[in-house]
Image: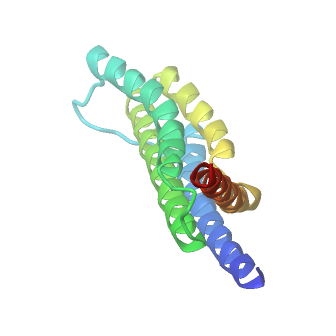
Amino acid sequence: MSESKNIFDETISSLKLYYWFSIAAVVPLFLLLISKILTIKVEGAEVSVTLERYAIVITILAIPAALKLFVEILKKTSPESDNATVIKRYKRASVIRLLIINAVTLMNIALYAISGNMNFFWFTIILFIIYYFCRPSYPELTGLTEKGEQKKPLRNEIQEINKANEADEENT
């Protein structure tokens, strides 16, 4: 168990590093833009109403999609999977979730910088709140492996009961 604990610790610490790096990449950019220290001037580039609407729809769809995709990737892990497979799936799901949130956050920051539209400002704030729910967690990872370990004995018991029933049927 201590070996698997080390693997879990390494996995969570590497994912947390990626998590904090993701936040550190977008928060300073956003703060520089709202404090007007950094300005982006694009000649003749105006954000059309159509682009604004598509950006809003993309943001509204991407947030639950990223969170749901994380769950769906983890659901595909079979209960018989070993710890290495569960860890690999958890890493992949976490990275994909953060990449989606990062992309949408950067899109909203860029559109806010270009257009100054407060919709993009508020969506960026909402996305920063979403980062809180995307934080890698040790209990979540260990819970995924424990579920598989709990199901294995139950299946063994069911198989033993079925064998006993078959033996009883043969004897009668």
Say which of 94 and 116 sits in front. Answer: 94
Work out which residue is located at the far left of the displayed protein and give it: 44
Task: Say above or below: 34 vs 24.
Answer: above
| Quadrant holding the N terminus | bottom right
In the rendered image, the residue lying farthest to the bottom is 3
Q: Is residue 1 left or right of residue 46?
A: right
Hey, which quadrant is residue 130 in on the image?
top right
Which color scheme does this rendered protein use? Answer: rainbow
Instruction: Note whether residue 108 is visible.
Output: yes
Residue 131 drawn above or below residue 77: above
68 or 166: nearer the eye? 166
Residue 66 locus on image (x, y percent): 48, 40
Q: At 45% across and 35% down in the image, what residue appears?
A: 108
Query: Could you say where residue 59 lies in the image, as x and y percent from the top left?
Result: 44, 29
Q: Position of residue 37 (x, y in %)?
A: 55, 47
Residue drawn at x 30%, y 24% as measured from the top left: 47
Left or right: where does residue 34 sit relative to residue 161?
left
In this picture, residue 139 sits left or right of residue 73 = right
* Residue 116 makes an appearance in the image: no
Image coords of residue 114 (percent x, y): 38, 33
Residue at figure coordinates x 63%, y 61% from the top left? 20
Q: Judge from the rendering whether residue 31 lies leftward or rightward of residue 113; answer left or right.
A: right
Residue 70, placed above or below residue 152: above
Is 147 situated above or below 109? below
Q: How many marks?
A: 0
Which residue of the protein is positioned furthest toward the front in this rendering?
172
Quadrant assignment, res 39: top left
Q: Residue at x 57, y 70 (%)?
A: 82
